[in-house]
Image (tube, rainbow, N blue to C red):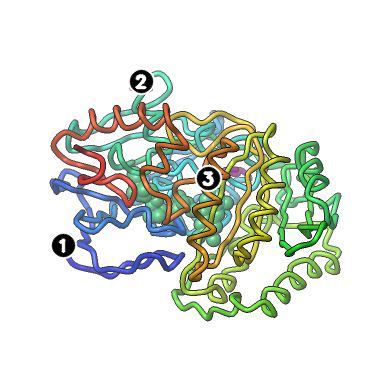
Amino acid sequence: MENKIFQSIDGLFKESLKYFKVKNIENINYKRISIIGKGNSISSLPFKKGSTLIDLEIEKKIKLRKNKRIIEVSGNMEAFKVHNFLLKKKFFFPSFPSYPMVTIGACIANCTHGISPKFGVMRDYVKEIVLYNPNFGTKVLSKRKNSKLFNLTIGGMGLTGVIIKAKLQVFKLKSSYISISDNKKFDNFNDVYNFLKKNNHIYNQNNLFFKFGKNEFIISRISSGNFTKSNYNFKSLDVSNIKSFRLGFLRISFFRKLLEKLLLIKEYTTNQKLIHINEAFFPSNSRLIYFNLMSKKFMENQVIIPHKNVKLFFKNFQKLYNKYSPIITLGHLKIFDGKGEYLQFNGKGLGLTLHFIIDKNFYEFYQKFLKLNIKYKCKPNLYKNSIIQINDIKNFYSKDFKKFSHEIRKINKKFFFENRLFYQDNFYK
Ligand SMILES: Cc1cc2nc3c(=O)[nH]c(=O)nc-3n(C[C@H](O)[C@H](O)[C@H](O)COP(=O)(O)OP(=O)(O)OC[C@H]3O[C@@H](n4cnc5c(N)ncnc54)[C@H](O)[C@@H]3O)c2cc1C
């Protein structure tokens, strides 16, 4: 065991933690345990002072059963390696996040979504999990076997134990390219929303920028498309780590305007008709510099707004925005169309992601913004948010929170799995 400094991407956590590389899972006998994948949840989710942060160092294995369209993969394997393995064999997996330097175990633990959550999120593609928890040993979980623990583990943020390996549903690729059929600019929120809601494209990449005191509150560009019929080219997806320095340029409106122009104009002028799957499904990967331009502290707020509340939410959000002037560097929209059990981030509605710069005025705005989110029954994404507190989760997830808490407390009697949100002093009482 060693002590190591960890820092969250959003800059809201930087501390030295007890850290242990696990080669043999049976060696896990710390009383308070938290698990790290790559530490790239944006937030400080895996980091809990007082816990021992464990990092799986078991042998990474991957196997494809072509006839069943299933892969079996170790929990500590990185998503980009799985993607490259599959691509070579003309298969792909649709629910990895837009930045692929993350582990499979963490993607299951967070129930991540890809570019098109409308067609499914992680929970729809996990077929089996092998879980280790020193409270009960190793268990195999699926919809049929230990189904309650299976559902709790997907989106359970590492609280049910260590995901050692998993079986995932994968899809056959006819082509490795997306053909862009629409590349539209919008300056009206309802038009953007309706466009996204009505189209059935697999790819709907968009950026959203906001304006003070204007009727045309937003400006956005969406490029959309589907896989081409047959056009196959294997290119390895390369990833780099997000560097920890923050230049703070995006605090300044001139640079935000520049970013807006670059992102909106670039997609105007390139006239790119075909996009390789590597760029289409992992758009953040080529834009990591964005984080270096960010301020030292920022927050990614992602919520699913139920369809029936979207218009009112947005109208009131516009008022709040004009009153408090929070600095939003970028927004994204995604349609969700599924079910979320316990605290899984899924549902039916509009997914709205906003990047807020944290300055001295932010928290006053945030309190009002939280209330707005609760009022319109939005579902927050817990794993991206370092500010949300356990009492807020109770407000947002009420019954699901109670059910989740009850089950997690039942599981962890002697050894306590923890994370930033759920830990011994505020949860296992
Ligand atoms: C640029 C960028 C873009 C992103 N885009 C998206 C996106 O499009 N969609 C999306 O859903 N998310 C997105 N995310 C969030 C991120 O991809 C996910 O949170 C991902 O799960 C993080 O993986 P990680 O390996 O870094 O996990 P960590 O941050 O290390 O851990 C995440 C959680 O998983 C638990 N955990 C880790 N390993 C295991 C294991 N083996 N067993 C059990 N629990 C475990 C941890 O305890 C923790 O609670 C993005 C993040 C970044 C930085």
- Is the stretch drawn in magenta largely helix, strand or loop? loop
Q: CA distance from mark 1 to mark 3?
A: 42 Å
Element at label 1: loop
Q: Whole-Å distance between the Cαs marked 2 and 1?
A: 35 Å
Pick the front one: 391 or 164: 391
Q: Amino acid at mark 1?
A: Met
Mark before the other along the chain sequence, 2 or 1: 1
Task: Name the residue located 14 percent from the left edge and 46 percent from the top edge.
Answer: 31
Q: Which residues are magenta?
A: 91-95
Q: Amino acid at mark 2?
A: Lys
Whichever of labels 1 and 3 marks the residue nearer the N terminus, that label is: 1
Residue 145 badge: 2
Which corner quadrant holds the C terminus? top left
Residue that appears at 54% across and 53% down: 301
Left/right of residue 276 with respect to residue 284 in the rendered view: right
Element assignment for label 3: helix
Q: CA distance from mark 2 to mark 3?
A: 40 Å
Q: Measured along the vertical axis of the image, is residue 323 above or below residue 134?
A: below
* Crowd band around label 1 with a 10 angstrom C-alpha radius: few (<14), some (14–19), many (20+): few
Element under label 2? loop
Residue denoted by label 1: 1
List the residue tagged with mark 3. 371
Q: Choose top left, top right, bottom left or bottom right for residue 208.
A: bottom right
Q: Position of residue 381 (x, y in %)?
A: 50, 45
Q: Earlier in the sequence, mark 2 or mark 3?
A: 2
Q: Position of residue 400 (x, y in %)?
A: 42, 29
Does the CB distance between marks 2 and 1 fall below 8 Å? no
Relative horizontal placement of residue 364, taking residue 305 as reference (left or right): left
